[in-house]
Amino acid sequence: MPSALRVGLTGGIACGKSEVLRRLASSGLRTLDLDLVAHEVIAPGGTAYEDVVAAFGPGILAAEKVIDRRALGALVFRDEEARRRLNALVHPRVWMEESRRVAQWSQAGAAVVVTDAALLVESGHHLRFDRLAVVHCRPEEQIRRLRARDGIDEEAARARLRAQMPIEEKRRFAHFEVSTNGSMEETLARADALAADVRRLAAQPRPVVTLNRSAAIGCLALGPVQGPRGLTPPAVLQEIGRSGGIDMERLSSLLRPRAEEPWYRVARPGETGVRPAALAGVLALWQMARGFEDEDALLAATASVARLTHREPAAIGNACVLGLAMLAVAAEDANGGTLLDRLPAWRAKAGRWAGGGFADELTPLLRVAAQHPDDVVAARSSAPALGADPGLAGALVGLRGAARSTASPEVEAAVDALLRISGRPATG
């Protein structure tokens, strides 16, 4: 039984996300509110209850030993370390319960499951989903709704907005958007359109792919040694394996110098050095480990990881294009000669995720792959003369799995970590 298409639903404060979720549920889609699941896991008898009480003491308990969420909130609101400790106790239990329900609903025949969570992007968990939908409206409308809903003045409403990730920034990570500007009837119609879109997407067959161990070894052992700001390809892949997926906050902890801000704010303008394209092969392997070929999921992941270190559209866009080329090679649905033919379409797709137009930097690299589709040594040695990076050429051609390379213990460990999350037997 195939798994349901998992759609994350998020948005800004007072954007109308709850109304959209209700509409999606009334249309027949399976829906899950993670805030309600969080309530369940810290309720008496819940999977996180005992640990939370042990960590924060009996002072957080109200009548009948129920955790007083206001008291708990007061403890962690201004204490970053306490908040991280609480999240470490609660979030894994929430994700486990969500996964359990998705599996149960998938087995019962659900084609789509929509999960509502306010801070999916901010927490760096948005890539756990096949698609992300962002509900948004104009900031002026958010302020008006906040004042009407909560009885606060304009400055208090603006302060709440300033404390959140700007909605325009959050929209960069969306596959789908639902605008709630306008009338309620218009909002409901847009929610109905989203329901129709995800149903159509779930009905489309997803090409199944199997991770090839030789290809994974070749990509890492023959590809770039360094990554942007210390994010070396093996280290990133090992972290993905430990997390069971792409957790942006955990990847952010690998940055050098160490990041002190939320993951989506740590990129420095004008970043020089290794560009995020060095990680394109790793993300293509991650997509392979998921068991199917999904360009849109890969684009979201590549753009998100690129934004850890770079802000420029060229750095983000070319990383996205190379990720698509790597996936095509790994999935064996393109040879070196056709990669160049597909470049314009890939660039058009990547432009939406890059946040602007960008100059092509990959034509020389794809020419190298076309000239030496099965010869990694020749590809790497000829790359500089054609204006291509030897490491990227090695990763791209190494993905074919033809070369027998000697892998370091770090590379072997990274590939083993990837295989553990694949859920499918590796070939090669």
Image (cartoon, rainbow, N blue to C red):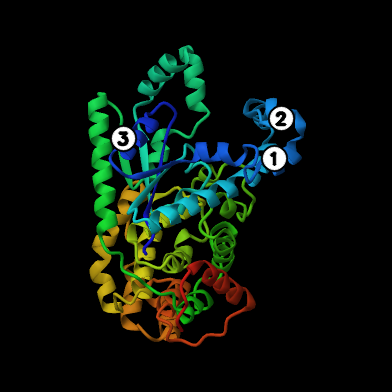
In the image, what residue type sits under mark 2? Answer: Ile
Could one spot residue 75 in this view of the protein? no
Instruction: Classify 151 as above or below 306.
Output: above
Mark 2 and mark 1 residues within 8 Å of each other at the beta carbon: yes
Measure the C-alpha gap from mark 2 to mark 3. 36 Å
Residue 172 rendering spot, x and y as whole percentages = 38, 43
Q: Residues within 10 Å of mark 2 (few under 14, many from 20)?
A: some
In the picture of the structure, the residue carrying the numbered disc 2 is 60
The percent position of residue 144, horizontal first and vertical second, equals 38, 17
Position above or below: 48 against 292: above
Helix, strand or loop for disc 1: helix
Considering only order in the chain, which callout, 3 or 1, is on the residue closer to the N terminus?
3
Instruction: Report whether 24 appears left or right of 417.
Output: left
Task: Point out residue 240 in the picture as x, y percentages from the top left corner.
Answer: 54, 61
**Which residue in the structure is indicated by mark 3?**
23
**Residue 396 position by quadrant:** bottom left
> In the shown orientation, is residue 416 left or right of residue 25?
right
Q: Return the mark for residue 52.
A: 1
Q: Hey, what amino acid is under mark 3? A: Arg
Viewer-side residue, 104 vs 214:
104
- Helix, strand or loop for disc 2: helix
Residues at marks 2 and 3 touching, judged by CB atoms closer than 8 Å: no
Binning the other alpha carbons within 10 Å of mark 3 as few (below 14), some (14 to 19) or many (20 upward) gives: some
Residue found at x 26% / y 78%: 337
Residue 67: % across, % down: 66, 31
- Residue 265, placed above or below residue 252: above
First-in-chain label (2 vs 1): 1
Q: Please tell me whether mark 3 sits on a helix, a strand or a loop.
A: helix
